[in-house]
Image: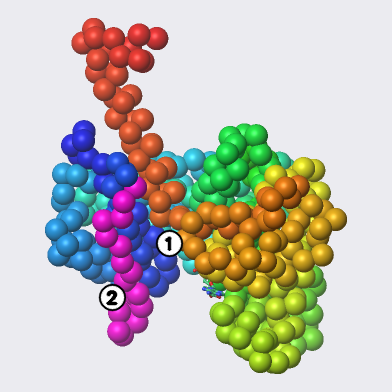
Amino acid sequence: MSDRATRVLVLNSGSSSVKYQLLDMRDSSRLASGLVEHIGEPDGAADHDAALKTVADELKRDGLGLDSEELAAIGHRVVHGGLTFTEPTLIDDTVLAEIESLVPLAPLHNPANLTGIRTARSLRPDLPQVAVFDTAFHTTMPESAARYAIDVETADAHRIRRYGFHGTSHAYVSRKSAELLGREPSEVNIIVLHLGNGASASAVAGGRCVDTSMGLTPLEGLVMGTRSGDIDPAVVFHLGRVAGMSLDEVDELLNKKSGLTGLCGANDMREILRRRDEGDGAARLAFEIYIHRLKKYIGAYIAVLGRVDALVFTAGVGENAAPVREAAVAGLEGLGLAVDAERNAVRSGLPRVISPDGARVTVAVVPTDEELEIAQQTYRLIDEDRKNSKNSKNSKTGTTGATGAA
Ligand code: AMP
């Protein structure tokens, strides 16, 4: 890698797709992006190896080949970092083995992430590769928020606790929100509502996550596109004992056939809003249940934080669905929350305030950008590494660098 290399390739290797973006960190511009889908299906790439080779070919076609001297690093999204990984981490064999040991906690995601890393390393063994974990931002949660009230020995033996997900998005959006408020992240308390197909809320105090709605897996918390979110765990026993369902069937029911899909047959908020407006009762009820749960989390996180400076909406639904934002905040004036109808109706890709002037709590929309956050975290890490190795070289030759002088 050249010392002047400023490009970062971000890879998000999912179970059946690989998403990529190539960014230039001098100005955070996007040089290329794409998606290879249907991995393992007849109409798609045979496996992750083949998918990544397609990514490499697409980049090459655009004159941005993986062999470029300008490429500084590859940043990988890794879903589960357990309690081990609290920060972006330079990947070596030990780190790979650690990620592997977390597979039981994320059996669908971590294996795909690992395959992506291994293939990328084989394509460019000389290049730094960095893992950025979806759980990392939440590792600051206090034990009171992270522990389930179950037998401690059982919990510890099986690493059962609340990890939280979407951390890259919550980190990025909470920092951007502080910027929007014109304050330092350390000075403000923020509730972030990441409402996409998957959805999660987080309470961020002074830049650190103190609670989040997803738990051991992304199933806990808000009503989502196809996931139930919070549910009495006894529903699982009941379905087993009374309905004769297997654990795998219940898993599938709660993860894939519940949430908005289970309630009204659609997981796309646009369709639900349209059907609701046409008088469809199931769509109306699905919307009301979705909003009711959201409100409960807003109230809970106001209580967790004690004082809230901003309530921020992000991701596909949060950024685009004005009726969801309006309904989520309706009736919460007593808690200092309100939305200005005109501001809420504005469509924009920029961070924006939607509460009225002088409101006690700023309500805002802040578009998320997980790829940019992964690229920035990756670049910061390798840039520090470059500086450190330069300093240690300087100190060896007697020239004083920052570290050498200390
Ligand atoms: P994400 O997972 O962040 O990509 O969000 C995807 C979801 O955003 C989709 O399933 C839609 O429900 C929702 N979405 C996208 N655009 C709109 C829109 N204009 N209005 C309402 N919902 C939208």
Disc 1 marks a residue whose amino acid type is Pro
Q: Return the residue nearer the eye: 59 or 310.
A: 310
Residue pictured at 62% horizontal, 34% vertical: 186
Residue 196 position in % (x across, y down): 56, 67
Residue 235 position in % (x across, y down): 78, 76
Residue at mark 1: 111
Residue pictured at 75% horizontal, 77% vertical: 288
Q: Return the residue nearer the eye: 104 or 22.
A: 22
Residue 144: in sight, yes or no?
Answer: no
Q: Residue furthest right?
A: 334
Q: Quadrant of residue 369?
A: bottom left
**Would residue 101 appear left or right of 141 to someone viewing this image?**
left
Residue pictured at 28% horizontal, 9% vertical: 400
Q: Quadrant of residue 15?
A: bottom left
Disc 2 marks a residue whose amino acid type is Ala
Secondary structure type for disc 2? loop
Q: Is residue 106 above or below residue 256?
A: above
* The label number, if any, that marks residue 317 in the structure image: none
Residue 71 position in % (x across, y down): 22, 46
Q: Is residue 69 above or below residue 285?
A: above
**Cβ atoms under marks 2 and 1 closer than 8 Å:** no
Locate the C terminus by quadrant. Answer: top left
Residue 185: in sight, yes or no?
Answer: yes
Q: Return the residue nearer the eye: 282 or 180.
A: 180
Q: Quadrant of residue 339?
A: bottom right
**Would residue 2 appear left or right of 273 to someone viewing this image?**
left
Residue pictured at 75% horizontal, 76% vertical: 289
Residue 39 falls within the magenta-colored stretch: yes
The segment highlighted magenta reads 28-44
